[in-house]
């Protein structure tokens, strides 16, 4: 395989981007960017990217012709930014939960010695913020 200057050598596989279906890509991209303290990038064709800062983008794509199936997205966040994210959820009156089944409202969890919370985005996707990766990884 010829060497491409845009291709970096690696011994591991890395996630580069994932598409997230939304009824309104602008609303959904701005929602997650606000909560995570990030910026929405310029449109790239039909996609509206949110750069997570680790080489991965969430590429929001409008899907209006059929219902959107809820997906789960988990974000490993710095411990010193977690409280600000919870504060932003509260400021826009989005309930957060300690559990993925959304049965323990207004509380966070302390899994694996960290802190975590779940919340739902405008299209029903189950979003998770956590300060420690799952221990079995």
Image (cartoon, rainbow, N blue to C red):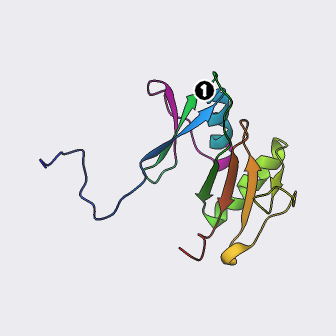
Residue 136 falls in image quadrant:
bottom right
- Outermost residue to the front: 66
Q: Where residue 88 sits in the image (x, y, percent)?
A: 76, 48
Q: Is residue 73 above or below residue 50?
A: below
The residue at 24%/48% (across/down) is 7
Q: Which residues are magenta?
A: 34-51
Q: Where residue 89 sits in the image (x, y, percent)?
A: 78, 48
Of helix, strand and loop, which one carries label 1?
A: loop
The residue at 72%/55% (across/down) is 84
Number of numbered callouts drawn: 1
- Outermost residue to the top: 65
In this view of the protein, which residue sits in the foreground, 64 or 5? Answer: 64
The residue at 23%/58% (across/down) is 9
Residue 61 falls in image quadrant:
top right
Q: Is residue 119 above or below residue 44?
A: below
Callout 1 environment at 10 Å: few (<14), some (14 to 19), or many (20+)? some
Residue 41 falls inside the magenta stretch? yes
Give left or right: position of 92 versus 43.
right
Give left or right: position of 21 versus 117.
left
Residue 94 falls inside the magenta stretch? no
Q: Where residue 67 sits in the image (x, y, percent)?
A: 69, 30
The residue at 19%/45% (across/down) is 5
In this view of the protein, which residue sits in the foreground, 5 or 133? Answer: 133
Q: Disc 1 designates what residue? A: 63
- Outermost residue to the left: 2
Q: Where residue 41 sits in the image (x, y, percent)?
A: 51, 34
């Amino acid at each position: 395989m010829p060497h491409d200057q845009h291709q970096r050598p690696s011994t591991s596989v890395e996630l580069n981007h994932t598409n997230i279906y939304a009824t309104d890509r602008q609303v959904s991209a701005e929602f997650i960017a606000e909560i995570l303290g990030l910026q929405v990038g310029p449109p790239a064709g039909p996609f509206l990217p949110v750069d997570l800062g680790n080489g991965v983008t969430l590429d929001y794509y409008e899907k209006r012709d059929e219902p959107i199936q809820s997906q789960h997205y988990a974000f490993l966040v710095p411990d010193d930014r977690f409280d600000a994210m919870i504060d932003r959820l509260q400021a826009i009156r989005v309930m957060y939960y300690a559990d993925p089944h959304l049965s323990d409202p207004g509380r966070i969890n302390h899994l694996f010695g960290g802190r975590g919370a779940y919340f739902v985005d405008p299209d029903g996707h189950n979003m998770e913020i956590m300060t420690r990766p799952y221990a079995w990884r």
